[in-house]
């Protein structure tokens, strides 16, 4: 039934993840490119801490479960029918065109706005849903994911320590110190 539907990714906070999976996606409150549900073809873009919360793994139980990783992040993998993509637009984090976010896409077509059909919530179980969740993408790293090679573009656009905005899971000054000292990051689980 999803033949012809495109893959896209939607980053979110941990507190919202289960609610989204059970109840569906809500349109964006901040609509930089217009009203609708925001997603991207790029999991790299969707993994920015503005969209996908980064959480430090604290307890020994969590460390066992996450193979002794230090940080975890998740992004929802979704499918959308191309007719329901209202806008294919540029990144909205202030990176611009001089830094490549994802080598598979240009920055001016990296963000999608999905038609929410004037609904407050797009229920994935609704047969008329314009977007459905098909997977949960998880990455666990041995250091902060902002130190990954694929995350270096973050520092060319908006990134902050405001937990309401960017959920870094670390103080930005500490992250910058690690970055400037050449600390590396590796995937434990992807």
Image (spheres, grey):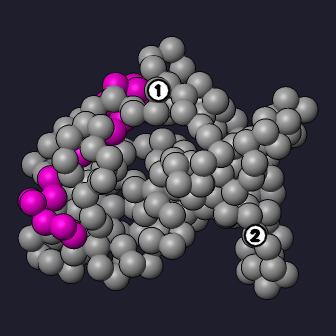
Q: Residue at x 53, y 54 (%)?
A: 164
Going by the picture, which residue comes out furthest to the right?
181
Q: Nearer the viewer, mark 1 or mark 2?
A: 1
In the rendered image, the residue lying farthest to the top is: 98
The relative height of residue 169 versus residue 64 in the rendered view (above or below) is: above
Mark 1 and mark 2 lie on one chain; the one further toward the N terminus is 2
Q: Quadrant of the N terminus?
A: bottom left
Residues shaded magenta: 103-122
For marks 1 and 2, give the CA distance.
29 Å
Report the side of 27 relative to 52 (left or right): left
Residue of label 2: 57
Residue 121 within the segment the image draws in magenta: yes
Q: How many marks?
A: 2
Residue 21, given in percent of the width and then of the height, sits at 37, 77
> Does residue 67 appear left or right of residue 78 in this picture?
right
- Per the image, label 1 sits on a secondary structure element best described as loop
Which residue lies at the image location 21% right of the left edge and 80% below the top edge?
A: 125
Mark 1: give few (<14), some (14-19) or many (20+) Cα within 10 Å: few
Residue 107, image x and y in percent?
40, 26
The part of the image, by quadrant, that contains residue 19 is bottom left
Q: Which mark is residue 158?
A: none
Which secondary structure lies at badge 2? loop
Magenta span dominant secondary structure: loop
* Residue at position x 21%, y 51% in the image: 36
Residue shown at 81%/79% (left/top)?
A: 59
Q: Which residue is mark 1?
A: 94
In this orientation, does residue 190 appear? no
Residue 97, quarter of the rendered image: top left
């Amino acid at each position: 039934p999803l033949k012809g539907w495109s893959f896209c990714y939607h980053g979110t906070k941990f507190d919202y993840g289960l609610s989204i999976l059970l109840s569906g996606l809500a349109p964006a409150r901040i609509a930089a490119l217009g009203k609708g549900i925001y997603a991207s073809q790029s999991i790299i873009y969707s993994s920015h801490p503005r969209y996908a919360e980064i959480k430090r793994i604290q307890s020994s139980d969590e460390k066992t479960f996450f193979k002794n990783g230090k940080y975890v992040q998740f992004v929802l993998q979704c499918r959308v029918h191309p007719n329901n993509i209202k806008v294919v637009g540029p990144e909205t984090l202030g990176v611009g065109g001089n830094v490549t976010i994802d080598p598979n896409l240009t920055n001016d077509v990296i963000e999608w706005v999905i038609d929410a059909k004037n609904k407050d919530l797009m229920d994935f179980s609704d047969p008329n849903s314009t977007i459905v969740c098909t997977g949960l993408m998880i990455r666990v790293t041995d250091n902060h994911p902002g130190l990954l090679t694929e995350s270096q573009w973050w520092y060319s656009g908006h990134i902050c320590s405001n937990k309401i905005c960017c959920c870094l899971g670390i103080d930005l000054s500490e992250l910058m110190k690690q970055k400037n000292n050449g600390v590396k990051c590796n995937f434990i689980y992807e």
